[in-house]
Amino acid sequence: MKSDLSVLEEFGASLAPMQDQPPAEVRHRVMNAMRPPARPPRLLSSLRGVRLAWRIGTPAVAAATVAVALVALNLPDDTRGRPAPPGATGVAARPDAVPPALPDAGQVLLLAAQHSAETPAMDARPNQFLFIDSFEVESRTDLHENRNGEIVSGKTTVSRPLRTRTWLSVDGTRDGLVIQEAAKSPVRTHIDGCTKGRQAQTIDRPETTPKVACTPEPAYQPGRVPTDADRLLAYVYTLAADRPVLVSVGSGPDGRPRGFVRLSADQRAFTGIAEILYKNHLPAVQEAAFRAAGRIPGVQVRRDVTDAAGRAGVAVTRTEAGTREELLFDPITYTYLGHNIIGAEFDPAGEQVLSSPDRRKGATRITRLGPNPKAGDVIYKSALLRVAIVDKAGKRP
């Protein structure tokens, strides 16, 4: 088997000369705030943006497109001094030249891992905070009570891109904060830290949920998340085994699902890596995460994908049960841009469809109750704009 280095060296022979990065393709799709309807509260293990016990967002396309375009075009350009990716345009080719092969999913992830390995770690003290500046877009399905007293789903909308600023404890023991744009005033959400081994069961509701035992999850220190690809892969598969996930299939006249399909461990592991990439920006963790993702069966590459800020990129994806998870990368530098969740075609024929959820395991989580998204529908998008280390939650760099 070829080593990671030899694969990258083979790429080097076909890389085009350095060129300026073209402007971001701001193909702004309706974004933010899609809540998989009627999902029970997310517990302390899950934080993707503000994806806690509640979800964020949703778009007003016209005005937001201009704002997002300005942000996308003013993002820092870190492409100078780096080679263009295989297949990059802008360099005159000989008529008889053979076009270089475009990288596959595994190669994209290796290039992203190499970029992380070359990224110097920021200086951070345990009592400081990781500041994450991002845009988020989600779809949200309204829930209402029918005449029989049952909660059913209604209209689904997709948010405009919402600026989201998050402060996570460097060592995981201090209370964090999320501030997100809203129509009338910013929405502030407290994030309960793991203090003296105790934390609110639902981390964004410390006043109303009981304290439970916890282990700190550092945002910018070595901790539970391994910095070795093999161990990180084993870690996300262990989490997948501990947290079964069911996806609803179809819906009847009352809006209730016709059945449920259990997500595979491979899909849950890929989703787990996406969550790690949001919560922990230590370069060693991110490098290990990219290498681990390349070892999950079923990953594919997808081009001309846009993030929540309208930036065009190349995506490494995995699709299952009507949902396509996408990790987006800059097509020039392979810097990580963000995470998308998009509706996909799904035929339940041949799948083991359960008539009702198995409640024997309390950790079982149900997603997307109500109408299933159509292929191409935005469920969630996040665009990472900047990370920095600051002294206190709420302070900007």
Image: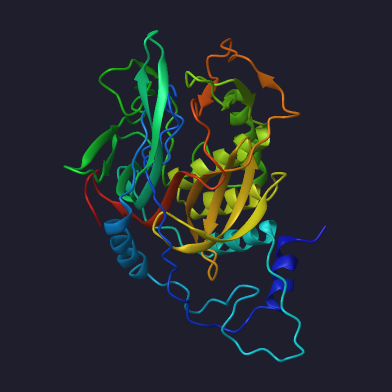
Compared with 208, 118 (above or below) is below
Compared with 232, 245 (above or below) is above
Compared with 231, 141 (above or below) is above
Q: Percent x, y for residue 264?
A: 67, 31
Q: Percent x, y for residue 37?
A: 43, 28
Front-most of residues 62 and 46: 62
Task: Identify the image quadrant of residue 179.
Answer: top left
Indicate left or right for 125 with 259 as reference. Answer: left
Is the C terminus in the top left, top right, bottom left or bottom right quadrant?
A: bottom left
Indicate left or right for 101 with 288 as reference. Answer: right
Front-most of residues 162 and 37: 37
Residue 51 seen from this side: no
Indicate left or right for 271 with 209 as reference. Answer: right
Q: Percent x, y for residue 34?
A: 40, 38
Q: Percent x, y for residue 42?
A: 43, 26
Give the residue at x 49% y 25%.
Answer: 369
Front-most of residues 117 and 34: 34
